[in-house]
Image (spheres, rainbow, N blue to C red):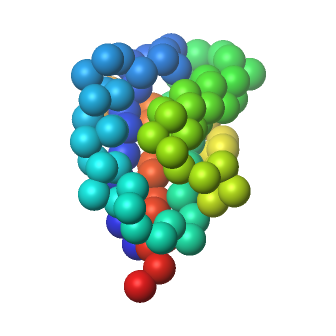
Amino acid sequence: MVESVVYFQAGESKLEHQQILKLKEWMSPFLNQNLDSVLLVGSADRSGNLAKNRKLVKERIQNIRQVLLSLGIDSQVLQSESLEPIFGRTAEERKLFRSVGIKLSISE
């Protein structure tokens, strides 16, 4: 299993251009390998409106998914999981929870 995380600004679901480039660069070595699955795990911190945070999680996952599809990743191997917004005690913890984890399972 190979993993990476993409972080988002508070209240944002769009990827910045630099983030898209980093994601494409990170994925590059795996594009010619047999991917069994690509799991996208989205989360948000609990500050603010709960319904809006749940929506942000789904939008963040969708935006990462679109980048992966544009790279030629087969939609059949893409899976997603939306976590409930997580309480962060500190600003740093809240920052870490505003993310989408990407977990690649690669055939040997």
- What's the residue at 42%, 21% (across, down)? 15
Left or right relative to 97: residue 52: right
- What's the residue at 25%, 42% (across, down)? 25
Task: Look at the image and tell me in which quarter the N terminus lies.
Answer: bottom left
Can you see residue 104?
yes
Compared with residue 90, is residue 68 higher up or lower down, i.e. above or below?
below
Percent x, y of residue 50? 69, 24
- What's the residue at 33%, 39% (across, down)? 24
Left or right relative to 20: residue 72: right
Decide which of 47, 3 is in the foreground and name it: 3
Percent x, y of residue 10? 44, 17
The quadrant where residue 17 appears: top left
- What's the residue at 40%, 67% (across, down)? 33
Can you see residue 3?
no
Decide which of 76, 42 is in the foreground and name it: 76
Total number of numbered discs in the rendering: 0
Percent x, y of residue 87? 52, 37
Residue at the far right in the pictured view? 51
Decide which of 11, 45 is in the foreground and name it: 11
Compared with residue 36, is residue 21 higher up or lower down, i.e. above or below?
above
The quadrant where residue 99 appears: top left
Left or right relative to 79: residue 73: left
Decide which of 89, 22 is in the foreground and name it: 22
Compared with residue 48, is residue 88 higher up or lower down, i.e. above or below?
below
Task: Look at the image and tell me in which quarter the C terminus lies.
Answer: bottom left
Percent x, y of residue 94? 40, 32
